[in-house]
Amino acid sequence: MRHLIAAAFSLFAATAAYAAEPTTPQEAMAPLKPLVGRWEGSGWMSTPAAGRQTFNSQEIVSERVGGAAMLVEGLHKNATSPNDVVHDAMGVIVWSPRDKAYRFRTNLSTGMYGDHPMTVEPGKFVWGMTVGNGGKVEYVTEFSADTWHETGRYSPDGKTWTPIFEMTLKKK
C-alpha cells in the first residue's frame, strides 16, 4: 500500500512539475530542442489555386537569441519538377513571458505573415489560424530525435475538417 501511495505521489509531482510555468524562455523552449538540425523528406499540400502538389522538403531549425527562440526555415520543391518551389516559409517560435504562451510567427515567400498561438508538449506542437473567410487551419507536428511528421487541415466551420498538408522528414 505504501508503494502505491508513493507511486501516486510521484506521478502527481511529475505532472505538477510538467504543468508548472517555465521560468525563462530557454526553459520553455526545452521541449522543442530535438527539432534543432537539418531535416529532409517529402510530402504533399493542397491549395485552392494549385490543387494537390507533392514535394521534396528541407527544414532547418536553429536556436537563436541564446536559446530563447527557434528559427524554422522550410523549402519545399515540386517532386516532379525540382526547380519549382511549391512552398517557401520561415517561422520563429517564441515563448512570451508576458502572455505566458507560445507564439509561432510565420512569413511566406508570397508576402503573407502571421503571429499564431501555439501549444507545446513533449514530442508535439500545434498551431493554427483563422483565415479570411472565417475558416480555420490547424497544423500538428509530432517529432522525435530523428523523425518529424506534420499534418495540416482546414475547416470552414470548426466542425468539418479536410486534410490539406502532410509531410514526413528524417533528421540528417
Image: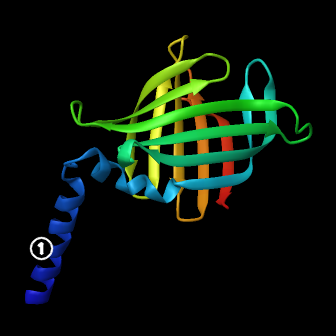
Does 57 sit left or right of 129 as displayed?
right
Measured as percent of width and height from the top left, residue 85 is found at 79, 31
Measured as percent of width and height from the top left, residue 157 is found at 51, 21
- When asked about the image quadrant of residue 156, the answer is top right
Does 9 sit left or right of 38 as displayed?
left
Does 58 sit left or right of 67 as displayed?
right
Question: Can I make out residue 169 in this image?
Answer: yes
Question: Among all residues in the image, which is located at the extreme right?
Answer: 80
Three-letter amino acid code at the position of disc 1: Phe
Q: Residue at x 53, y 17 (%)?
A: 131
- When asked about the image quadrant of residue 110, the answer is top right
Looking at the rendered structure, the secondary structure element under dot 1 is helix
Measured as percent of width and height from the top left, residue 166 is found at 67, 44
Query: Looking at the rendering, in which quadrant would you find the C terminus?
Result: bottom right
Q: Residue at x 20, y 71 (%)?
A: 11
Q: Please name whichever residue, 171 or 11, is drawn nearer the observer in this view of the structure.
A: 171
Q: Which residue is mark 1?
A: 9
Question: Can I make out residue 158 in this image?
Answer: no
Query: Looking at the rendering, in which quadrant would you find the N terminus?
Result: bottom left
Question: Among all residues in the image, which is located at the extreme left?
Answer: 2
